Amino acid sequence: MLTIGQLAGYARVTTKTIRVYHAKGLLPEPERDSSGYRRYRAADAVELIKIRTLAEAGVPLARIRELRSGGGLAAALRQIDDDLAARIDGLRATRERLRRLADGRLSPLPDAVVASLDRLPGLGFSERWVALQNDLWILVFATHPETAHRNFRDQAAMLDDPALLPLVLEYDRLHDADPHDPRVDALAGEIAEATRARYGSELPAYDEGSAIPALVQGAVNASAPAWRRLDALLRDRLRPGTPGPPS
């Protein structure tokens, strides 16, 4: 027969831990002697060591009680191992983000988006355009991650299309143009024609009712009067039912 102090010493836990296990129903309360002290047997020591082993492996106490009271221990432990592996992957990703932040790379964007933004100056885009695209992608990826990935791939493909890239570059260059510069009207026509050819009548869209597209386009339009008029012209020419250019 063992006292609680002796049991704690043999199992390498504290007496407080044993009392917690009693309170949570993990280790049954033993009988008490005539003086009112708990007296433990070898079986209690074995149970306590098993509980301690599970706890040291990272199994929550609530799960230990569940596992000790039912069957399927091996399968349950494998599930716990899978959960821990997923948590480890998440912690590694968090650690990598912290390292990027420590290096001054403050963008929360996916690596593919960052790499695409890094390409833009070499393609001829202005620093203003790159900064605007960076901020808008941050907004879109934070609010619509699924849609953002699809739209990013679509826009990245435009930069690799020799017919579409000049249109996007011209959009950037018209930032300081007069809103009624003939180039604005010409570009609106070219973009509308290219958009119809690329998508047909099913234009890319966000979730129904989302305010993000308006916020994004509003940020672009607020940057320059020429861009604001260009957007208005495009909306008019891409409106459902509006005929395309004669073939």
Image: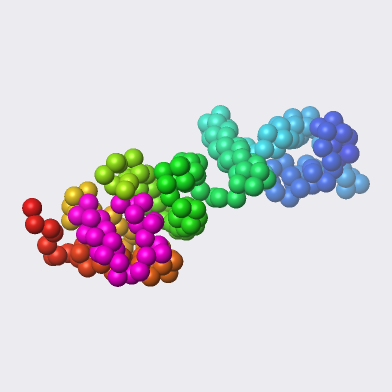
**Could you say where residue 208 lies in the image, as x and y percent from the top left?**
31, 63
Left or right of 38: which side holds 176?
A: left
**Could you say where residue 177 lies in the image, as x and y percent from the top left?**
37, 65
Q: Nearer the viewer, residue 162 or 56?
A: 162
Work out whether residue 67 can be spotted.
no
242 magenta-colored:
no
Q: Nearer the viewer, residue 125 or 178?
A: 178
Q: Which residue is rendered at x = 30% and y = 52% of the image?
A: 167
**Could you say where residue 228 lies in the image, as x and y percent from the top left?**
35, 68
12 over 197 or under it: above or below = above
Q: Which residue is rendered at x = 18% and y = 50% of the image?
A: 197
Q: Quadrant of residue 239?
A: bottom left
Q: Which residue is rendered at x = 26% and y = 65% of the image?
A: 182
Q: Quadrant of residue 236?
A: bottom left
| Numbered circles on residues, count | 0
- The magenta span reads 167-194
Main secondary-structure element of the magenta-colored stretch = helix
